[in-house]
Amino acid sequence: MINQLFFTTDNLDILDLLLCKHSFNFLKKDDQGISMKMQPLI
């Protein structure tokens, strides 16, 4: 489901992303240094 995943911060908690993977909008935060491309679940 996840096409590409880029992490540019060392303080990023991977578990938080996995637990919140149902929320797509929070992943697009420039201040967090997160860039993520996701494909539709369909």
Image (tube, rainbow, N blue to C red):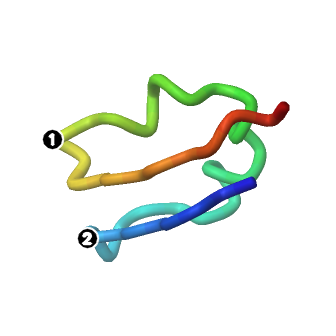
Label 1, label 2: how far apart the Cα atoms are? 11 Å
Residue of label 2: 8
**Secondary structure beneath label 2:** loop
Q: Nearer the viewer, residue 38 or 13?
A: 38
40 lies above or below 5: above
The residue carrying pointer 1 sits among few (fewer than 14), some (14 to 19) or many (20 or more) residues within 10 Å by Cα, namely: few
Task: Residue 36: give x, y in percent of width and height.
Answer: 42, 52
Dividing the picture into quarters, in which one does residue 8 lie? Answer: bottom left
Q: Is residue 2 left or right of residue 25?
A: right
The residue at the point 69 percent across, 60 percent down is 15
Q: Residue furthest front?
A: 42
**Secondary structure beneath label 1:** helix
Q: Amino acid at mark 1?
A: Asp
Q: Is residue 25 left or right of residue 30?
A: right
The residue at the point 64 percent across, 50 percent down is 16
Q: Is residue 25 left or right of residue 34?
A: right
Task: Residue 41: give x, y in percent of width and height.
Answer: 80, 35
Q: Residue furthest right?
A: 42
> How many numbered badges does the structure rendering display?
2
Task: Residue 22: give x, y in percent of width and height.
Answer: 74, 30
Dividing the picture into quarters, in which one does residue 1 lie? Answer: bottom right
Q: Residue furthest left?
A: 31
Q: Is residue 19 left or right of residue 29?
A: right
Q: Nearer the viewer, residue 24 or 11?
A: 24
Picture disc at residue 31: 1
User: The C terminus is located in which quarter?
Assistant: top right
Q: Amino acid at mark 2?
A: Thr
The residue carrying pointer 2 sits among few (fewer than 14), some (14 to 19) or many (20 or more) residues within 10 Å by Cα, namely: few
Q: Residues at badges 1 and 2 in contact (C-beta under 8 Å)?
A: no
The residue at the point 38 percent across, 69 percent down is 6
Picture disc at residue 13: none
Dot 1 or dot 2, earlier in sequence: 2
